[in-house]
Image (cartoon, coloured by chain):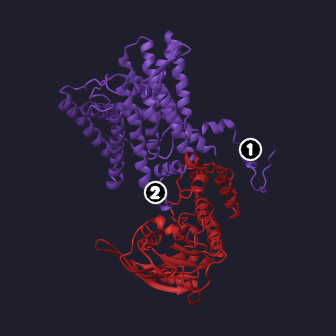
Chain colours: A red, B purple
Amino acid sequence: MTAPQAPADRETSHRALVELDNVSKFYGNIKALTDVSLEVHAGEISCVLGDNGAGKSTLIKIIAGLHRHDAGTFLIEGEETTLANPRDALDRGIATVYQDLAVVPLMPVWRNFFLGSEPTTGAGPFKRLDVRLMRETTRSELLRMGIDLRDVDQPIGTLSGGERQCVAIARAVYFGAKVLVLDEPTAALGVKQSGVVLKYVAAARDAGLGVVLITHNPHHAYLVGDRFVLLKRGAMSGSHTRASITLDELTRQMAGGSELEELSHELERAPGPTHLGGHPVADDPR
Amino acid sequence: MSTVAGPSAPAGSDERLLRTSPLRKLLGRPELGSVVGAAAVFIFFSIVADSFLRASSLGTVLYAASTIGIMAAPVALLMIGGEFDLSAGVLVTSSALISSMFSYQMTANVWVGVLVSLLVTLAIGAFNGFMLTRTKLPSFIITLGTFLMLTGLNLGFTKLISGTVSTKSIADMEGFDSARQVFASQWTIGGVELKVTILWWAVLVAIATWILLRTRFGNWIFAVGGESDAARAVGVPVIRTRIGLYLGVAFAAWVSGQHLLFSFDVVQSGEGVGNELIYIIAAVIGGCLITGGYGSAIGSAVGAFIFGMTSKGIVYAEWNPDWFKFFLGAMLLLATLLNAWVRKRAEATK
């Protein structure tokens, strides 16, 4: 079994790969998500922005098949769907890369790369993992994305956070995902590594995938995004295309007008980056 | 191959692997700690017990190791999958009792009892796995429950049916001799008496190693034990994997149970209690991480061999066998410390 690379005959019509229409999710009597709409198109990046607790994780879990939505419609290529589990989502071409549970740290890189979709060779009781293919493919696919590993046998836990994200992205691309969902891929990373990861996100987009980028960083989102959905306390507080919004406006909406003004005053008084405590909010244009 | 630091990296070559010496590769193996430990135990008893090095002793040591090793291999896989099975020890006895009592009560060919026992034992394994994946309670609690229930059932049923704590002899029943051939025969090779369990042990360890390192299921075992949420997210059937692991333990318990039955012809219903910990100890000495995700089946075999050497070595050294548990405990601590140290070094030098 060989996984197809980005298929050439990808539909280029305006039909969205994934479309959420007024989707809601309740946990008991708690409204985790209310009437959220989102479109994901091939070759585009849809960003979901929101602060902690805004409902980003709930949204991602619905798209990834970990949770079922309670109201609204969830369309995959125009067809209404309720995903039963993550396998179901994968089979329909939706691959999700989680911030912290993307990989199994103690396992070698090549075992991680093929986890859940291992190629086999031989038949009957001698059916076995195609270890050579797995190693070589892992090395060459990562190289193609610009990651040059010394040793595909090293436990993936020994890679840096950015490299791990990139392995997970490379894996999704290799297995022919049509939609790539990225959960805060840059949250735990430094500025430079964030840049590297965003480069792979853009590479995945250029390969024709539809990308959902979940982040709380408007700067990162604006660098690569085509559409922006803003979440606040479980509800949608804005939905924009790149043409209809500027970075300043996006940042303002994200932080909330008055809060932002306060913040910018504080920033003016404290010009050093020490004020940010080393937190990687910034590719800021200073 | 001379390697000067430089950015050029032709695809597919290993030019930056210069520093990964074979020694370092060896240090990265989960079994290493146990092999060092086994060598130390072997040398120790060779010095303190004169008869330890005799060929006949080897057969005895291997036999003791095999009765533990047959169970330790699937228990190791289960531990790599991140779970425990505290019912494994008494399950062996249950399996023997079911086989014996069914044949006796139904006056059937003993092979019928053997097959019924296989089905029931697998069902108990499936029950463990099902309860675990369904309730999401820790396997420690689930299998502790099964352990206690089986202990009670073993004694209760045996007393109810045969009136004593042991089963009736099935030695004169049809099929007994052929079943004994399979489960409890022995050969003498070059003056060394070798029991068939050693063969079963070797085969089970080989199969377990094959499964673990060369099949999809093996990849899933590592993943489920290492980070089950991540495994589930990439489509690994976590529930099926866990249930499969419990079935593996049950199968080995069936093999051990039949050996127990056919090496004598009666079964003591109170046996097996405490053995579950020895299986776990063998797996841990063999390099299995108690939190799952790391370990090896071969390591469990080395762990079982250490157990065999220690339990028989103490006899050959003519010491009071009461000391055995102390040795086992000390061994466990040392092996675990050594394993942790080795793993840390192996990861740090990458």
Helix, strand or loop status at disc 1: loop
For label 2, the residue is B237
How packed is label 2: few (under 14 Cα within 10 Å), some, or many (20 or more)?
some
Which is more N-terminal, label 1 or label 2? Answer: 1
Is B31 positioned to the left or the right of B258 in the image? right
Chain of residue at mark 1: B
Q: Position of residue B247 (x, y in %)?
A: 40, 44
Q: Where residue A98 sits in the image (x, y, percent)?
A: 51, 64
Residue placed most toward the observer, A199 or B238: B238
Q: Is residue B93 left or right of residue B81?
A: left
Q: Residue at x 48, y 39 (%)?
A: B288
The residue labelled by disc 1 is B18
Q: Amino acid at mark 2?
A: Pro
- Do discs 2 and 1 share a chain? yes
Q: Give residue B336's mark.
A: none
Depicted A90 relative to depicted B275: above or below: below
Q: Quadrant of the N terminus of chain B?
A: top right
Name the residue at the bottom extreme: A244
Alpha carbon distance from label 2 to label 1: 38 Å
Res B146 → quadrant: top left
